[in-house]
Image (cartoon, grey):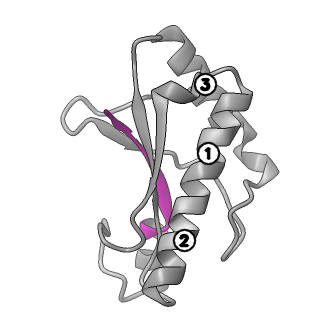
Amino acid sequence: MLTSKADGKTTLSGVFFDSGKTELRPESKSQLDQVAATLKAQPALKIFIVGHTDNVGALDANLALSQGRAQAVVAALVQRGIASSRLMARGIANFAPVVANSSEAGRAQNRRVEMVLQ
């Protein structure tokens, strides 16, 4: 669940936010519980939580939004007993899309939170 051995990262597909918001939606609980359990089972593991956006909106706003979402995930993991020293939040807006932002489906794929091995 944690990462692909090939690239050292995974998308947290079960983490949800309302549009333009940084508060985690309640249906994110299961994914966050799973991540916390994985991190508890691997106590030496340190990770980056990386927030991504699509290309809609101003860059500064997207940087702030992606950073806020990454910080919300870190805070949720700390509340679940993960040491904050093992986690680092970074928001990178729309600098690393996985697909083109030319359609709503593409933009939806690009709005994501990833875990990346430090």
Neighbor class of circle 3 (other Cα within 10 Å; few <14, some 14-19, many 20+) is some
Q: Quadrant of the N terminus?
A: top left
* Secondary structure category for the residue under label 2: helix
The boundaries of the magenta stretch are 110-118
Above or below, 3 relative to 72:
above
The x and y percentages for residue 38 are 52, 19
* Secondary structure category for the residue under label 1: helix
110 left or right of 66? Answer: left
Please report the residue visible at 42 percent of the width from the left and 29 percent of the height from the top.
Answer: 2
Please tell me how many numbered marks the rendered image carries.
3
Please report the residue visible at 49 percent of the width from the left and 60 percent of the height from the top.
Answer: 112
Which residue bears the numbered disc 1?
73
Quick one: 3 or 89, which is closer to the camera?
89
Please report the residue visible at 54 percent of the width from the left and 81 percent of the height from the top.
Answer: 61
Q: Which mark is residue 64?
A: 2
Q: Which mark is residue 36?
A: 3
| Mark 1 residue type | Val
